[in-house]
Image (cartoon, helix red, strand yellow):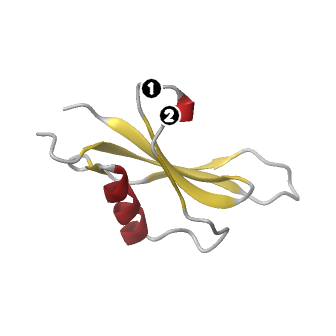
Amino acid sequence: MTVHKARLSNSFQGEWELYVVTDRTSTEWPEHPFKRTGPVPTVQERAEALARLGYVPADSAAWEWQELPAGAMERVKLLASLDVQQKGEAS
């Protein structure tokens, strides 16, 4: 089983985007833009986006959040990550 990292970020112009970091170059990573700045996409919305990209959460995976450095007066940028695997791949 190959495990990849899915990332959910609001750092690109403040809009939420989910992408999967694969072995390919960053211009080829599967991605899903949510096309909104708020609210944060729900767990269900993230699961549906991952499924459309051909991925599912890895066994026992949970979203991990971190706050990215920003100025005191700037909007907080968040990054969440989750271990994922391709759909149909044996665990």
Farthest-out residue, right: 73
Q: 39 above or below 28?
A: below
Q: Which residue is drawn at 41% across and 32% down?
A: 22
Residue of label 2 = 28
Q: Residue at x 74, y 44 (%)?
A: 69
Q: Which amino acid does label 2 sit on?
A: Glu
Farthest-out residue, left: 90
Estimate the x, y position of residue 59 in percent, counting from the top left: 20, 48
Estimate the x, y position of residue 76 in percent, counting from the top left: 73, 57
Judge left or right: residue 81 versus residue 39: left
Quarter of the image with the C terminus is top left
Q: Residue at x 35, y 62 (%)?
A: 47
Q: Residue at x 64, y 69 (%)?
A: 36
> How many discs appear?
2
Residue of label 1 = 24
Q: Which amino acid does label 1 sit on?
A: Arg
Give yes or no for contact between labels 1 and 2 (Cβ–Cβ under 8 Å): yes
Estimate the x, y position of residue 7 in percent, counting from the top left: 49, 47
Quarter of the image with the N terminus is top left
**66 or 91, which lies in front?**
91
**53 or 72, which lies in front?**
53
